[in-house]
Image (cartoon, grey):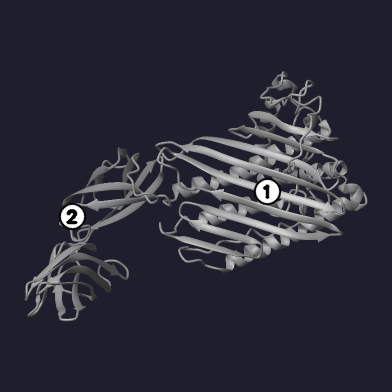
Amino acid sequence: MTQWSIRTVGVVVAIALVLPACGGGSDGASGDKPSNSAEATSASGTGGSDSIPSLVEGGVVTDAALAAVFTADGQANVEVLQAFVAEFSELPLDQQEAVAADLALRTELEFAAISGLEAAAGGRDATEAALIGAMSQVRAQSDAAAATVAAQEPEGFRRPLASPDPAPSGGTVAAIGLFLGYMALATFGKVATEATNTAKPDYVEAREGDGMALALSLEEVDVELKFKGDQDGVDVDFVAGATIHPCPEPDGTFTLDAMIDVKASKGGAGQNSKIELKISGTVDDNAELASQNIENHTQWSDFGGGKGQFVDFTMSGPNGAGEFAFNRSGGTVTQEFVNTAVTMSVLVAVMISYQLLDAVQTAWKSGRCVVLKVTPSAGPEGLTPSEVVEVLAEPRSKVDGSPTGGNVTATLSGGGASVEPNGSPVPADANSTYTAPDEQDKTGTVSYESRSKRGVGKASVTFSTSKPAAYTVAGGLEDWQVNQVVCDLTQPFTLTSPGVGVAEFSGGLSGTYSATGVFNFQYAGTYQITLENGLGTPGTMIGTSGGSIADQAGSGSENYVLTPTTC
């Protein structure tokens, strides 16, 4: 066992963290604040940095650190809390989880003594065993839910949701050592967001079962995990959920909400812990995180016994430890418990917030939120050697279709000959110039990337001086039937239906067309070409049009088969 294994594997690993991170609702109770608490304070400690003790020694939060959280006059020592967050953030994730696991269990057991749950359960050891046993059931249900989700490949996903990593061996505390609320939010919330980064703009899906509920779309990801069960007569009611908005608003703002709520009771004694996080931030014109704020509302209360023990506080700031306010507290809640609860809540909020912030940054940088439309003035296939092509790159929001602004960078990523400017950002909508290679049958690939407050858009175009791909186009609708060779689909082309009429197409893999013919036949519409694997491979074309014939209105869709050929 390493120094980070704090307690026996069963103790730290199982559930310690689940309950603590879940702050508790005061269920409407009210009362006087302890004499050593502060009125809605936003205070900094008076001690200098040299007087701040280390947060962690030997893998656990020290008593000296907990004692330094509040000043002698009962004000939250923000300087100390921020120093603790900085020290904690430098630890590897597995060590963060182990430290938080131990502190969470200590917090839960301290409050069990205050709320009366410890007495009802038969002592501290019995309470600890019951809580760990009950939370192991939550973990089992969580694993089952993850396996169910991972086994399904929802429409719109390019890959299924992945289950959490297997539980580590030995004394390490990774996927199972951290309280399950954190695991549900950091794992399911993050994985569900990343899995939908490739979803289409109109994608919507909802799933429920195995204690897990998911509501997924391009604009919002909602995840929730619920559990009700008992262990050794201790009943546990557990809920963890998050609402994630991965795509920034036009002004670059975004929001995340997370909540963990756990109730544990036996007989007439019980306790409720609840933590609510509101995470907000802004994105700059280069699609980077410009600012963030973490608001953490934590509550602890007893219920069933009528004793009125409760504590309710709020913290906020870039790292969740800037402003501090006591909302209310009372009963026999001790200052020592408050110190432990505040420290635990700060550390849990840091871990959850950073995981979810990482998920949304990955999302808006993946191309999830922005489509980058790239339109070359010619080609991209069949260019003449050294031909110069003007290219327009237009980034648009996938959420509302509006221009994103920001900048676009074009980079020659393969082949020849050149693009100008190459690798330099240009204000969107952006123009660049591609020059084709000076030999026949050569290619050049240009990668385009847009960056703005709405996120990152990506596109790639391969230009070539190869001979254009020719196709036999066969098919149509009713009397309109064609069977002819088109030497270059990328250029304007004409299809003729013998004895019926002629249709003029704009050229390219999609565009417009119009047809005229006998009996005052006049139709117009759009078409879409789909090829199996790029130009030169088999494909299909669908034309959708409306118009009239013999002064009778109508509409329809023509279906064509495209077969590669030569000219």
- Residue at 19% x, 75% y is 473
Indicate which label's residue lies in the foreground, 1 or 2: 1
- Residue at 80% x, 42% y is 107
**Tag on residue 378?**
2
- Work out how far the residue at label 1 is from the one at label 2, CA to CA, in angstroms: 56 Å
Q: Position of residue 365 (x, y in %)?
A: 44, 47
Camera-nearest residue between 545 and 293: 545
Q: How many marks?
A: 2
Instruction: Check disc 2 and report its element: helix, strand or loop.
Output: loop
Residue 519, by quadrant, is bottom left
Q: Check the image and report above or below for 492 versus 60.
A: below
- Residue at 39% x, 37% y is 285
**Tag on residue 260?**
1
In screen coordinates, is 445 left or right of 181?
A: left
Q: Position of residue 187 (x, y in %)?
A: 61, 54
**Tag on residue 53?**
none
* Among numbered discs 1 and 2, the one appearing first in the sequence: 1
Camera-nearest residue between 149 and 312: 312
Instruction: Check disc 1 and report its element: helix, strand or loop.
Output: strand
